Image: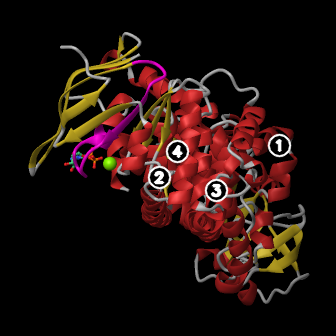
Amino acid sequence: MRLRTLLWKELWLRKSRMMSGLLAITLGIAVIVGIQSVTAVSERAVKIKLDNLGANILVLPQAASVDDYYTADIDAPTFPEDYVERVATSMLPGVDNLSPKLTRRVKVGDVPVILTGILPANELASKPIWQSAGLAGAELAAACGPSPEVNKGRSFVDEKLQRKAIDSLAPGELLVGSVVGQRLNLKDGSKVVIQGREFTTARVLPETGTIDDDRIYAHLHVVQDLLGTGSQVSAIEIMGCCSAISDGLLGKLRNILPDTRITTIGQIVNTQIETNRLMAKVSLILLVIIFLVGAISIANYMWANVEERRREIGTLLTLGATRGSVYRLFLAKATILGLLGGIGGYLLGTFSALVLGPQLAGLAVEPVPVYLAWSLLFAVAIALLGSWYPTYRATRLDPASILQEF
Amino acid sequence: MLGLERVTKAYSSRRGTVHALRDICLKIERGSFVTITGPSGSGKTTLLLTIGGLIRPTSGRVEFHGTDLCTLSERHLAAYRNQKIGFVLQSFNLIPYLSAYENTMVPMSLRNGATNNHEQKAKALLDRLGLADRMDHLPRELSVGQQQRVAIARALGNDPEVILADEPTGNLDPTLSAEILSILRDLNEKDGRTVIMVTHSPEAARMGRHHVRLVDGCCVEADGVAATR
Ligand SMILES: Nc1ncnc2c1ncn2[C@@H]1O[C@H](COP(=O)(O)OP(=O)(O)O)[C@@H](O)[C@H]1O
Ligand SMILES: [Mg+2]
């Protein structure tokens, strides 16, 4: 027989008492895992909403003002479209959805409209150089928020907010803002002639209440052709991960594109940064509370367990155990309880989140396997922390005085 | 051979200092049977635990075959208790969640190195003490007499030279007491172990070939074991 046999026998023959201690850790971990699983999803949901507010970084020609971006004068300055690739190949972390635009005022019949050339998402992805950049984009999406599929799958799509996700646009097609659509009396499928070239209206966009309602969107390269600007654009809109923006993303972009003006769209960025901060704080507070509650309840159990086993400790010391071996015996027990509680807590927490998430919060929660490792680490840490002092005290006891107590 | 030289033990607490042992000098030859008597609180248990290496005396020396126990490290003192001493206590102190068989193996499993033969040794010991059919019982499933016999089997686990028994019959009725006392006599006479037994009962006290009487921490009688100063 080995000394560790005592450990298993004690756990086994005092199952019911052990279960109460185990339950404390298990429930603590379950609550953490459950809350974290739901928080992870809702954080993503909030980020998707935030990102749907649109691009938050603007790259403009050096000489342009932000006003130019909105008014789109005929002679507003431009810069080469290649700049997009410069940013994409630089693999800067925290850069997503680069979208180059060329904007000009034109007339359709007598009606003045703003014509904006854009690159649809599917063309961005199909360029080889963009695909390699897309790898970085995938990581970014994981760290920073939504990919369009996640977005749709989770039904967070909000038509009005969705300015960026124009997936495909053929050379002969237009997307028409609602005000322009009304004024020109356009429907899906109507023909429009702009500067002598005929287009088909692919879709009249829903009303947004912004300047976008006065716009007509066409393929960037078609617009460049039509206006004879060559490979020039008037702006690049970028969706920057807001934590990357706080880490100085703008400066890095300025290094890559020295002869441009780079600004953030302040309101959007501030909202994003504030919201992220708030969520991080709430998670941290919950974590601290649960850590304390967990540590206290396991300490309580171990304390009672040690007290109850004073006589046994005295007996072991009498029979020739060293203090060190008794200490190890109790800490080993704490470790085992921690491991069991960690696994149990992870399973219980994940299961509850999967079941309750959709019912209570309307969020589809997915299991997060990394949390298992964290649960184990955390539970063992709590159990050791809670057991350390009572065990220390128990091994300091004078065996003689324990034996004389009875 | 066990020698105590001017052993004094004082317990200090906030309420003052209690002198549990004063100037005890004894010389106990290997193979002796020594009984210790004295009124309650006279220091009998303290004396026994001091000999067993559980209490370090405030002053004086406890020698075992010429080695002063005070000079031993904690680890060596633990090994001394484990291999040289077998404790039999009044309240048995069996580990409640271990069977008789497993309780008997505890001192063996605390011994560094040798891990073999535990099962056989434990079986043989329980057999010798007439517990062959109770091996797998938990302490609470045993009578008090049986529990005390398991405690004795456990004390013999590492074949110790010295058996220290603190009122081993204090909780037993006369028949069971006689049974336990005859086991202890066997351990002394047949095995040649040194047995040192604290007792309240005059008959039990008469069993010892040597006798120590304590009053108020002082040795007032040390028949055959007095050390020459
Ligand atoms: N751990 C201790 N702390 C303080 N005083 C103690 C302690 N153990 C014993 N004593 C005191 O020492 C004296 C001797 O105790 P003990 O050896 O248990 O006597 P006995 O076994 O003869 O009844 C008693 O007065 C007791 O109160
Ligand atoms: Mg006593």
Tell whether A233 sits left or right of B224.
right
Badges 2 and 3, same chain: no
The type of residue carrying mark 4 is Leu
Quick check: marks 1 and 4 in contact, CB under 8 Å?
Answer: no
Using the numbered discs, state the Cα–Cα distance from disc 1 to disc 4 in whole angstroms: 91 Å
- The crowding category of the residue bearing disc 1, from other C-alpha atoms within 10 Å (few below 14, some 14 to 19, many at least 20), is some
The residues colored magenta run B29-46
Give the secondary structure at mark 2: loop
Which numbered dot is residue A11?
Answer: 3
Using the numbered discs, state the Cα–Cα distance from disc 1 to disc 2 in whole angstroms: 88 Å
Q: Quadrant of the N terminus of chain B?
A: top left
Residue A5 locus on image (x, y percent) = 67, 43
Q: Which residue is mark 1?
A: A131
The type of residue carrying mark 3 is Leu
Q: In the orientation shown, which residue stands out farthest toward the top? A: B66
Tell which circle, 4 or 2, labels the residue nearer the N-terminal end.
Answer: 2
Number of the front mark, 4 or 2: 4
Whether residue A391 appears in this view of the structure is yes
From this view, report whether residue A141 is shown above or below residue A286: above
Quick check: marks 3 and 4 in contact, CB under 8 Å?
Answer: no
The type of residue carrying mark 1 is Gln
As for residue B12 lying within the magenta part, the answer is: no
- The crowding category of the residue bearing disc 2, from other C-alpha atoms within 10 Å (few below 14, some 14 to 19, many at least 20), is many
Which numbered dot is residue B169?
Answer: 2
To which chain does the residue with label 2 belong? Answer: B
To which chain does the residue with label 4 belong? Answer: B
Residue at x 87% of width, y 83% of height: A188
Tell whether A384 sits left or right of A169.
left
Quick check: marks 1 and 3 in contact, CB under 8 Å?
Answer: no
Badges 1 and 3, same chain: yes
